[in-house]
Amino acid sequence: MDIKNVLTQLCTADGVSGDEASAASAALSLVSRYTDDCGIDSFYNVFAKIENGGDKRPTLLLDAHIDRVGLIVTYIDDDGFIIASSCGADERMLAAQTVTVHGAKKIKGVVCTLPPHVKKESSGRIVIDTGYNKKQLEGTVAAGDRITVDSAPRTLSDNIFTAPALDDRAGVASILYALELLKGKKLKYDLVVTFTAREETGEDGAKIAAYDSGADLALETDVSFAFTPDAERHECGEMGRGVMIGIAPSLDRRMSNSLIRLAREKEIPYQTEVMNGKTGTNADSISVTGGGIPACTLSIPIKYMHTPVETVCVDDIVATSRLIAEFAAEQGGTLNV
């Protein structure tokens, strides 16, 4: 499987939170290579089931979110400027960016900014100029339409890849590659794979998907902060050093220990990510669904999160996939530790 090609397919799909149809369709086409028992639910969660057949086994849920950050149209003023609000996007990155407005048809625009020699302070508003007046926009753009910042996937070096929406399409890709690694192998668990909607706005998709999954335990694959010069090194992961195994009060410590032991045994590059409360991922919601689902996070170090130039190391995605596959395999992870 060409991971960069898969990332490109995933990251060029739209799918701002609450409008995930195109991203869900792209993910479904990729996961359908591994099972016929797959689809998209009414919430735009992608689901896929892979069962061993024969005796019933515990069910392992593999989840990553499919939505991406962006903007949402709030209204169009009398001069034709589109006023927007953030759906998770880092507003510091927006000035003078080109964008696509996903209305009845796609329209290009630019984020308005005053020249620095006349700008006094931020207005606190995100304003989009498409070149059209209000009458021309009527019927094409409406309140609630999503907006994405224009940025193309590209390779920076042999194994460093940058694209919008790597949070969390990189996690989706890691699960897909894990399924590739598991082809033809006997599994310890029946698998339910979910690529869930609306994580960036409250983890709502995961709550529904986890409830429907009937899972006995779960691995949540997301991204987490990689070190950059403006950050504290001890607070970040490091790109190229492998998967980040989560340890937190909201996670199951038995799973964390099992994953660490497995990574050591299989010589999979890993680092730990210690959090003092919630993880800020779908694992927080999955773990308290129904009667409770033991869960752990596997995070891919990412630079420049929630910007148009999110950056990851493909080797870290591979390490994440290998650990997922080893955990799910017949001699894989267990909670009896």
Image (cartoon, grey):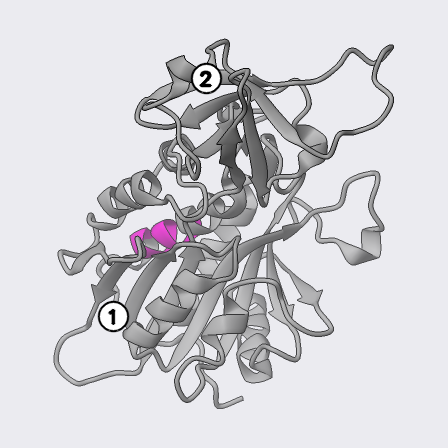
Of the residues shown, which amino acid type is indicated by label 1? Lys
Residue at the image point whose x is 37% and y is 22% from the top: 138
Q: Looking at the rendered structure, which numbered label has been put on residue 24?
A: none
Q: Which residue is mark 2?
A: 134
Residue at the image point whose x is 46% and y is 23% from the top: 100
Quadrant in the picture for the C terminus:
bottom right
Give the mark nearer the N terminus: 1 vs 2: 2
Residue at the image point whose x is 34% and y is 60% from the top: 194
Rendered image quadrant of residue 330: bottom left
Q: Residue 12 at what x, y percent from top left?
A: 40, 30
Residue at the image point whose x is 38% and y is 65% from the top: 62
| Front one among 264 and 152 | 152
Q: Looking at the rendered structure, which numbered label has been put on residue 186?
A: 1
Up/down of 40 relative to 77, above or below: below
Up/down of 30 relative to 264, above or below: above
Residues packed near mark 2 inside 10 Å, few (<14), some (14 to 19) or many (20 plus): some
Position of residue 128 in the picture relative to residue 49 (left or right): right
Up/down of 333 relative to 101, above or below: below
**Labels 1 & 2 near each other (Cβ < 8 A):** no
| Front one among 288 and 257 | 288
Which span is picked out in magenta?
A: 174-180
Q: Residue 103 at what x, y percent from top left?
A: 36, 28
Which is the main secondary structure of the residues drawn in magenta?
A: helix
Q: Residue 105 at what x, y percent from top left?
A: 32, 22
